[in-house]
């Protein structure tokens, strides 16, 4: 199977070609509120970090739901591919999402 | 067919790999470390139909990309040691992410069996797997299991044996292909590789090509020796650039995407999830345990309970060990004649062994508590809740537990604290935690504090203790911050923390965990600590008194006893030295002293005993002054003068290197202040108060120094063991002592300038 070719790339990603930035058309995952969910559009950040997140399941099109914020508002907890994972807000800001909707 | 089979057990963290390993091997397992690193390596054997199956438990990893030490270890084992088969333990209730590792394992071309563990949990969540179709898609045997109940174990072993006996799969059985563009480039690299790479081992050339295309630095190192290296690298660079152009993203990302694409496809075809409206128990528990208000409160309670459990729970055992060692010390004392051998056996060996074993119940209890936290899944929540607080100081949410055990509540111990960092996966944060943990107020520092506070701040015990706890926390956090931004600078590991569902731990798992970690401590640290205790004993014993001085003290002792015997009240009952000796022996039996307190003999005897004790201590003090440690202490006077320590304090601090509580007894000996048994601290305090140069400021300076200076030998040995490097042990020794000196100097100077605590 062949991965889909997507022409639009994020400017924040050093490893990517210089295309139109998606940041304006997307919502950072760190801006999601508990109970909201949406789909991954793009993962930015340094190459190692991107790959790590992709391996943990944050691949394009994956649905992510925000469960909650830690008692001190950072880090955040998500459900990805049916399991729970926590990231710091700063890291979650590298994950660009589509408009959130309320989880059922 | 009788040869030994080697099987590697791979799987994600929290997939129940350890449960299956324990169920397979039972008690026939062995723990060690992977060569050169401090990651635990577990091995065990199963016998089945006269076949020996040797099972190696690989570290739990999410992938085999070489991000972490664990991933490199797991990958290198599969490549270099070429196990006959890999069993991939997969959490059936979390199939999609778990299969990422499986796909990577398939790609490596080794024989593989998928153990779909926790099938019961998956079914409970309404997940049904079309097993035949799934097996067909994956192309490897799939066994449905429930490791906790031992369901599927037999099937697993049978599958292992039948797979091992089959011929190796050929390369073209690969299920996963990456689309024509990628495949074309892979083929180009593969072509050059297979020309120069003849060994058809597990590391097949396709896998190598994939890794090279992904730009894996570890693998690039591996082809260093190949003749065609330059040609290969050239092709890899060309291919990477080409794919980057087509996909607008680097090949490793494209491949990761494609792997998940393959997995999603397979899951869509074979897995059905029935949406159940049942409440997820784990999530409901988590709502309370990580609640904004209740969460931190429960966390404090849990940490406090771990602390209480570790220290109070083990107290009876520790006491039992203690009294056993003091009993055997006394026993041997009474058997062996006075002299060097006795001193070596009693003060060197028995104290040393006692030191090692004395810690063991503590460590076992702590590991048991930690095993509960880990196996239930609460450990991840501790890191989740505390990360915000600790990361600013170069630490990690998971550092909290180690710091608490090390003495975050006064009275802990750095040794189990440092061992507790084994649960941390982030190398830098773990190292910082190890390095700062000894600054906490451990239980051995408390007698020193008690002595000095009792003498100089009798009215403010509680307040001073609270202040000291506060100061040690501030020091730990500041030191963490400074170390992290200087010696250990660099970006922190990304905080990618799985929050596994809450689970009920199995007793077998808890006990095996506790036992193997405790055993590691005994085996690895124990021997070294014993050797070091003997060295310290030698330093504080040799070269001893010169014959002239010895004779001088003997003569003085004779004079003392003969003048006592001449006393009219005494000479009636005790005629000669022989009588005196037997009288002394009878008096030393417990409880007799008080009965005859008012007879004239008893009064005279009390006086005599005190004089004798003073003389003995004078001798001990002089003896100590003459030893190597005493000379070093005296030699260091010019160094410690600015903070007001004399040679006696210096020797005591040197002694404290063996164990901090030794500071008290050595101070006692050095100041020849009479018996320094624990129950007589008040006397020692009282006497210390009247020594010239001692005042509250001096006492506080010494307290600060003792709090911060070089960790005790046991701690240092454990630091060496856990970091694997001598230089970190040395660093821990030097930086703490410098910090102690600087802080003591500031306290001393400020106090003197402001005129605080001088009287």
Image: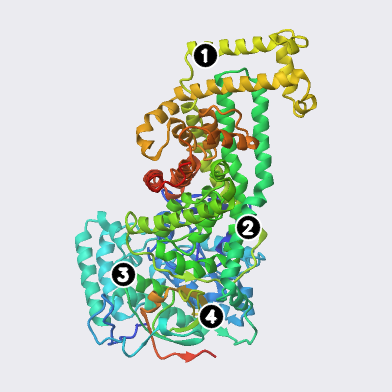
Asked if marks 3 and 2 touch (Cβ < 8 Å), the reply is no
Q: Which mark is residue B550?
A: 1
Q: Which mark is residue B510?
A: 2
Q: Secondary structure at mark 1?
A: helix
Q: Secondary structure at mark 2?
A: helix
Residue B432, compared with residue B121, is above or below; it is above
Taking the image as shown, residue B484 lies to the left or right of residue B651, namely left
Distance Cα–Cα, label 1 vs label 3: 77 Å
Distance Cα–Cα, label 3 vs label 4: 31 Å
Which label sits in the foreground, 2 or 1?
1
- Local packing at callout 3 (Cα closer than 10 Å; few below 14, some 14-19, many 20+) is many
Q: Which mark is residue B267?
A: none
Q: Quadrant of residue B16?
A: bottom right
Residue B9 horizontal/vertical position (percent)? 51, 60
Q: Which mark is residue B214?
A: 3
Q: Name the one closer to the observer, B495 or B334.
A: B334
Q: Secondary structure at mark 4?
A: helix
Residue B568 horizontal/vertical position (percent)? 73, 10
- Local packing at callout 2 (Cα closer than 10 Å; few below 14, some 14-19, many 20+) is some
């Amino acid at each position: 199977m062949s991965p889909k070719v997507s022409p639009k790339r994020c400017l924040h990603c050093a490893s990517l070609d210089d295309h139109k930035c998606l940041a304006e058309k997307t919502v950072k995952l760190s801006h999601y509120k508990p109970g909201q969910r949406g789909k991954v559009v793009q993962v930015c950040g340094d190459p190692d970090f991107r790959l790590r997140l992709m391996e943990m399941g944050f691949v394009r099109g994956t649905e992510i739901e925000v469960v909650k914020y830690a008692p001190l508002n950072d880090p955040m907890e998500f459900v990805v591919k049916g399991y729970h994972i926590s990231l710091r807000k700063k890291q979650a800001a590298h994950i660009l999402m589509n408009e959130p909707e309320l989880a059922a | 067919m009788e040869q030994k089979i080697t099987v590697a057990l791979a799987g994600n963290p929290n997939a129940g790999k350890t449960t299956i390993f324990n169920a397979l091997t039972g008690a026939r397992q062995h723990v060690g470390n992977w060569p050169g690193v401090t990651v635990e390596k577990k091995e065990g054997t199963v016998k089945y139909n006269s076949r020996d199956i040797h099972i190696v438990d690989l570290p739990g990893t999410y992938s085999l990309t070489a991000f972490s030490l664990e991933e490199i270890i797991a990958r290198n084992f599969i490549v270099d040691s070429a196990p006959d088969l890999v069993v991939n333990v997969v959490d059936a209730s979390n199939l999609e992410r778990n299969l990422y590792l499986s796909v990577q394992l398939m790609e490596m071309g080794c024989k593989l069996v998928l153990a779909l563990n926790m099938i019961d949990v998956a079914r409970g969540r309404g997940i049904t797997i079309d097993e035949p179709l799934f097996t067909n898609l994956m192309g490897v045997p799939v066994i449905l299991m429930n490791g906790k109940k031992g369901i599927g174990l037999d099937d697993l072993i049978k599958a292992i044996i039948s797979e091992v006996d089959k011929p190796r799969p050929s390369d073209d059985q690969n299920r996963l292909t990456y689309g024509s563009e990628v495949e074309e480039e892979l083929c180009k690299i593969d072509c050059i590789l297979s020309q120069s790479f003849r060994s058809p081992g597990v590391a097949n050339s396709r896998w190598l090509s994939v890794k090279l295309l992904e730009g894996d630095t570890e693998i690039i190192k591996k082809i260093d020796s190949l003749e065609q290296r330059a040609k290969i690298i050239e092709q890899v660079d060309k291919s990477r650039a080409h794919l980057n152009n087509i996909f607008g993203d680097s090949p490793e990302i494209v491949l990761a995407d494609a792997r998940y694409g393959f997995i999603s496809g397979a899951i869509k075809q074979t897995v059905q999830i029935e949406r159940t409206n049942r409440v997820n128990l784990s999530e409901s528990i988590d709502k309370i345990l990580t609640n904004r208000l209740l969460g931190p409160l429960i966390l404090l309670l849990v940490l406090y309970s771990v602390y209480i459990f570790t220290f109070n729970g083990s107290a009876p055992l520790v006491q039992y060990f203690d009294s056993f060692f003091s009993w055997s010390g006394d026993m041997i004392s009474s058997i062996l004649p006075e002299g060097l051998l006795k001193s070596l056996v009693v003060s060197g060996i028995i104290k040393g062994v006692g030191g090692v074993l004395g810690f063991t119940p503590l460590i076992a209890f702590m590991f048991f508590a930690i095993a509960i936290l880990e196996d239930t899944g609460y450990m991840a929540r501790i890191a989740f809740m505390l990360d915000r607080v600790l990361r600013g100081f170069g630490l990690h949410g998971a550092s909290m537990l180690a710091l608490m055990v090390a003495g975050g509540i006064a009275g802990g111990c750095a040794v189990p604290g440092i061992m507790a960092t084994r649960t941390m996966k982030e190398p830098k944060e773990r190292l910082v935690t190890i390095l700062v943990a000894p600054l906490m107020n451990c239980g051995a520092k408390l007698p020193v504090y008690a002595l000095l506070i009792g003498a100089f701040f009798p009215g403010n015990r509680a307040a001073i203790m609270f202040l000291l706890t506060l100061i040690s926390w501030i020091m730990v956090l500041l030191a963490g911050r400074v170390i992290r931004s200087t010696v250990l600078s660099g970006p922190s590991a990304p905080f990618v923390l799985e929050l596994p569902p809450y689970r009920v731990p199995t007793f077998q798992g808890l006990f095996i965990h506790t036992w193997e970690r405790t055993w590691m401590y005994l085996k690895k640290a124990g021997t070294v600590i014993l050797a070091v205790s003997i060295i310290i004993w030698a330093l504080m014993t040799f070269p001893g008194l010169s014959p002239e001085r010895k004779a001088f003290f003997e003569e003085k002792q004779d004079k003392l006893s003969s003048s006592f015997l001449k006393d009219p009240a005494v000479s009636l009952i005790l005629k000669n030295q022989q009588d005196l000796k037997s009288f002394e022996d009878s008096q030393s039996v417990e409880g007799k002293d008080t009965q005859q307190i008012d007879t004239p003999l008893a009064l005279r005897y009390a006086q005599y005993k005190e004089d004798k004790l003073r003389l003995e201590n004078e001798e001990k003090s002089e003896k100590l002054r003459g030893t190597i440690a005493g000379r070093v202490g005296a030699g260091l006077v010019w160094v410690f003068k600015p903070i007001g320590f004399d040679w006696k304090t210096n020797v005591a601090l040197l002694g404290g290197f063996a164990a901090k509580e030794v500071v008290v007894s050595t101070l006692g000996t050095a100041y020849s202040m009479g018996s320094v048994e624990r129950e007589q601290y008040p006397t020692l305090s009282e006497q210390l108060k009247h020594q010239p140069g001692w005042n509250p400021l001096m006492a506080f300076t010494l307290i600060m120094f003792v709090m911060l200076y070089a960790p005790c030998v046991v701690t240092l040995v454990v630091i060496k063991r856990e970091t694997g490097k001598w230089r970190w042990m040395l660093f821990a020794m030097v930086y703490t002592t410098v910090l102690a000196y600087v802080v003591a100097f500031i306290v001393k100077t400020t106090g003197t300038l402001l005129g605080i605590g001088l009287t």
